[in-house]
Amino acid sequence: MRCGSHQGPSQKAILLGVTLYSMALPAFAHNPLTGSGQERVAGVLSALLLLGFWLMYCRGSLRVRPALTKALTFHLTFLLCVLTILGPLDDLAQTSTAAHMAQHMLMIVVIAPLWVLSQPLPQVSAGGARSVSLLWQAALRLARYPMFAAYLHGAVIWIWHMPFFYMLAVDNPWWHGLEHAFFLLTAGIFWWAVMRSSADNFPAAVMALLFTLMHTGFLGALLSFSQAPVYGESRGVADQQLAGLIMWVAGSGPYLLGLGWMLRRWYLRQPA
Amino acid sequence: MTDSLTHDTQAREKSGSLHQKLTSAWSNRPGWGVLSSVNHGTVGVWFMLTGAAFFLVGGVLAMLMRSQLAIPDNTLLDAALYNQIFTMHGTVMMFLFAIPVLEGMAIYMIPKMVGARDLVFPRLSAFGYYCYLFGGLIILMSLFGDMAPDTGWFMYTPLSSAQYSPGSGPDFWLLGITFVEISAISAGVELTVSILRSRAPGMTLKKMPIFCWCILAMALMIIFGFPPLILASVMLELERAAGMPFFDVAGGGDPLLWQHLFWLFGHPEVYIIFLPAAGVVSTLIPVFAGRPMVGYGWVVFSIMLMGFVSFSLWVHHMFTVGIPQFALAFFSAASMLVAIPTGIQIFSWLATLWSGRVVFALPMLWIFGFLVIFVCGGLTGVMLALVPFNWQVHDTHFVVAHMHYVLVGGMFFPLIAGLYYWLPHFSGRMPSDKLGRWAFWLTFIGFNMTFLLMHLTGLLGMPRRVYSYESGMGWDGLNLLSSVGGFVMAAGVAMIIVDVAMHFRFGRRALPNPWQADTLEWALPMSPRPYNFASIPSISTRHPLWHNSDLPASIAAGDHMLATTSHGRRETLLTEAGTARVQAIIHLPSNSWLPLLTALVMATVCITLLAKAYLWALGAAVLAAVFLLRWSWVNGAHPGSAPIRSDDPVDPPLHSRTTDGPGLWGMVVTLMANATLYLSLLFGWFYFWTVSPQRIVPDEVPISFTVLFGSGLLLLLSAAVYQNVVTRARAGLAKGLQARLLMVLTAGFFHSVSLVWVMLTSPLQASDLTHDALILFLLMYLVFHSVLSWVLTLLQLFRVKAGYVGAKMPYELIVVRPMWIYTTVVFWTGMLAFFGMPLVWPVSS
C-alpha cells in the first residue's frame, strides 16, 4: 500500500468537522474578532473592509435599484463571505490544511462567482467614492483578457500554496488577510472575465476555465497523493489529502457549473 | 421557349467548362504521383482503408487469443507470445484502428458537411496520414521480429522500464506511438481550424450539424489529451535509452507518475473515440426518423460538457494503486457525473426516435445494436465506479468485457452504421440489404456471446492477461463459448467486407440522396469530385437539403460563390468563426511530395533511434527540419502557392493578403497542444517535489544562473522587438523592417547560444537523479523553442528579401508572433517553477 489505507475515523471526523463547522454560527467558535493582539486587529480590519464594501453596495442600491434576485444573491454571498473569513473555518485553518483549503475554495469558486453573478458594480460604483470605482475600472480592464486573468489567478493560487508562503499566511494574520484579498480579487477578475465574456472572447474564456480546472486539479492531485506533510510536520498527511481532494474534486463542481452557465449564456446569444 | 432553351444550353456549357477547370486545378497526379495527393477526400479514404487493414490485424490477434483460451491448458501460444499478442491487440485497436479511422472519417466528411472544398491545411492531412502509416508499420514490424512490446497496452512502469523489459519491445511502442500521435495532433489542429473557419457562409455555429460539433470536440480533446502521453513516452524512452530516471525510485522518481500522465491522456481518449461515433448516431437518427433532432441545443451542450468532465477524472482508472480511502469515495461519486451528458444524448436520441417515423434501414440496425450494447457497457461502467466492486473485479475478464462493450458498442457499431450510410455517397451504389443484415446479426450475436459471457468468467475470478488456465475452475465452458462467439463475430466482420467489396460491382445504382438526408454532403454528386462544391452556397437553415431541394443543381451550375476559376488556384472560403460571415478566400496548396518526404525522413529518425544509431538519427532529424522549412517556404506569395497577380480578388481578398487566416489559428491551436505538454512537464516537476516517495534533492543546482538570467533578458528583448516588427508591419510601415528583424535574430542568437552553453556545460547528474533529469529536460525543451523561434524568424527575413512578406503583406509575420510570446512565457515560467520554487520549498526530510 502506497498511502496507508487505514486512516480510519480521524479523516471522517475531519471531513464531518469541516462540514459541520462551516455551517455553525461563528459565535460558537473562537474567531479572529475575539482573538488576541495582532490577530484581533487584522480580523477587525478585514471585517471593516468587508463591511465597507457591503455598505457601499447598500448605499448604491438606494440610488440604482438592483433586481431582487441579484440583490439577494449579493447579500447572501456577503453573509457567506463573512462566515468564511471570520467564521470557524478561519480558526480551524490554523491547524488543519483541509479547513484552510475549504476556506480558500469557498472564496475562489463560490463567493467570487456568486458575486459576479449578482452584478454588483452599478450599485457599488453608485455608492462608493470615485477612487474606488477607478479600482474597479482597472480590474475590469484586466477582465477583458480571460487567459490573462486565468494566468494571474493561477499564479496567485500556486504561489500561496508554496510551503513558505503558505506557512507565512498561517502564522501571521496580516499575511493571511493579504492572501485572502489576493484570492478574492483575482478570482473575481477571473470569474468576471469568464462569465461575462464578450462573444469574441468566448473561446478564450472556455480555454481559461479549462486551464483553471486543470491546474487546480493538478495542485489538488499533488496534495491528495503526497505521503509527506508539505506544510510542516504538525499537520497530518490525511488532513492534507483531504485538502487536495477538496480542491480537486469538490472544486471541479463549481467550475463545471460555471462552464454550463457560460455555455448556456453564449448559446442563447448566438445568431440563430 | 427557344430563349429558355438556349439559356439552358448556355448554362450547361458554362457549368461544363467550370467543372473542367476545377478538375484540372484539383486533380491528383496520375500514376505514382498519386502519393503526392493532399486532397482531403483522397487522404480520408487512405486513412480509413489503412485503419481497416489494422483492424483486421488486431482482429487476427484477437482470434489467436480466443483460440488459446478456448480450452484449458492449451499449448497453442506460450506465455511470452501471448503477452505480446494481447499488448499488440490493444495497441493496434486503440492507436492504429479506433482513433485514426475516426480521424479519417472526419477528414473525409467535414469539408463536405460544412460546405468547404478541402480542409484548410491539405499538406498537413497528407503528412498526418504518412506519419500514421509509417508509425503503424514500425509498431507492427516488431511483431514479426518476435520483439513486440509485451507489457500491456498502457505500458506501466516499472514493468516497461529498461530493467524489467530489456528487449526493444517498449521502444517500438514508445517511438511508434509517438509518431502516430503526431498524426493525431495534426488532424486535431486541422479539423479544429477547418470547422471553425471554413464553413459555408451563413452556417452559424447553431446551424452546424451535430456531427461537426462532435468532431470539433474530438479535435480539441486530441489537442489537450494527447500531449501528456507524448511527454510521458518521450520521458520513458529517454529513461530507457539514456538512463534519465524519470520513473525510477532509485533516482528519486516515481513509477506512478507514468500512470498519471497515461490516464491524463487515457481518460479523455475514451471520449475521443466515443464522440465521433456519437456524432454518427446523431446524424443518422434524425434522418431515419424523418425529423430534426430533439433538443439540438442540449446535445451540443452535453458534447461540450463531456469534453470538460473527461479532463478532471483520470484517477478513476487507478483505483487500486493505493489512493487514500476517502479519496476513493470522492472519485467514485464524481465518476457518476459523466452519466449526465451521456444521459442527455441518449434521451435526445430516444426522443427523436419516439417522435419520428423510423425507417429501419440497414444503417439503423447498427444504430440499434449500438444503443443496446453501449447502454449495457455504460451500466457495467457504473458498477466499476463503485470502489468495492472495482477492487473485486480488478484485472479480471469482467473489466475486459466492460471495455469491449463500451468500445465496440460505442465506436465499432456506429462506425459500421456510418459506413453503410455513406457508402452510396462514395460509390453511387447501394450495398446488399440481405448480406448486410446477415453481417449485422452475426456480429451482434457473436459479440454478445463472446463478451456477455466474459462478464461471468470475470466474476468467477478469471484474471485477464494470463495465457492459460487449469481445468475445473468453472471457466472451461464459458471460455469455449466466448471463443466460439468470437469466431461468429469474425464471420460477421468478414461478411461486411464481402458486402462492401461486392457492392462496388453488383450494388444497384443509388438514387440521389437515397436516405432523404438533410446535410450538405448529400448535395454533392454521388462519388464526389475532388473539389466537392463547384460553387459554395450560402446556408440559412440547419437542414439545407430538407428546405431547399434545388441546392444540388444550383451548386453544380456554379450559381454560388467561388465559381471563378481563371487563376487555376485551389480555393475555399474563410469565414468568421461564430457568424460564418465571409472574410477572405483561402488559397490552398496543391499536390506536394513534401509531406511524404518529411514523414519518410521522420520514420528514418524512429528506426535509427530503435537501432541506437544516434548520429544517423540526428542527421535525419536535421533533414526533416529542412523539408519542413521548405514546406513553409512554398506558401503565401511564393510562385508555387499564390503569386501576386493583377486579377487578385479584392473583396473578399486572398487570406495571405490579410492579417487573419487559418495559419494564425493553426499556430495558436498547435501552441495550445504544446502548452498542455509543458503543463504536464510542470506537473511532473511538482509531482517530484510533493509525491515522489523517496525524493532526492541535491544540495545545489550546478547551473550558472547569471548566464541563464542574461539569456532570458535577451529573449525578452527579441520578443519585444518582434512585437514591434508586427505592430509596424500591421500599420504598413516598411521602413526598418529588415533591420528590426536582424535585431531580433541577433538577440535571439545570443540567447539560444547561451542557453545551449548552460545546458551543455552544467554538470547535471541527469542519469542518476530524477531532479537533474527533469531540469535537463526543461533545458532541452527551452532550447528547442528558442532555436525554432529563431529559425522561423530567419525564414521570415529571407521571405521579406524575396518579396513574399512585407509591410503590404504582414500576414506571415503575424503568424510567427505567438511563437515568440510562447517561447518567452515558457522560459520565464520554467525559471520560476524550476529554480524559484525550490527557494520557497523547505525540504523537510
Image (cartoon, coloured by chain):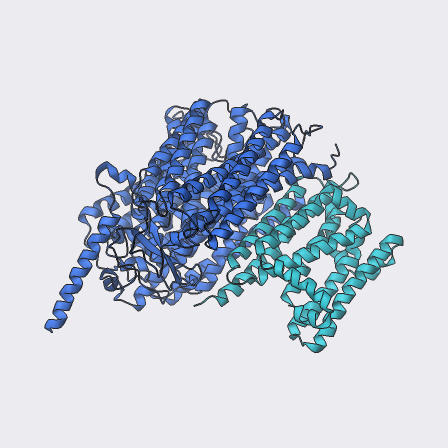
Chain colours: A cyan, B blue
Can you tell which quarter of the image residue A235 is in? Answer: top right
- In this rendering, the answer to whether B380 lies above or below B513 is above
Give the percent coordinates (x, y) of residue A249.
Answer: 63, 50
Q: Is residue A106 visible?
A: no
- In this rendering, the answer to whether A111 lies above or below B101 is below
Marks counted in the figure total: 0
Can you tell which quarter of the image residue B66 is in? Answer: top left
Q: Is residue B187 visible?
A: yes
Q: Nearer the viewer, residue A28 or B783?
A: B783
Q: Give left or right: position of A227 versus B174.
A: right
Q: Nearer the viewer, residue B168 or B93?
A: B168
Instruction: Give the farthest residue toward the right.
Output: A37
Which residue lies at the image location 50% right of the left edge and 40% below the top edge? B742
Which residue lies at the image location 49% right of the left edge and 60% below the top edge? B301
Q: Nearer the viewer, residue B354 or B305?
A: B305
Give the percent coordinates (x, y) of residue B55.
Answer: 35, 39
Give the percent coordinates (x, y) of residue A190.
Answer: 62, 57
- In this rendering, the answer to whether A265 lies above or below A251 is below
Instruction: Give the farthest residue toward the left.
Output: B2
- Point out the image quarter for the N terminus of chain B: bottom left
Which residue lies at the image location 89% right of the left edge and 53% below the top edge? A37
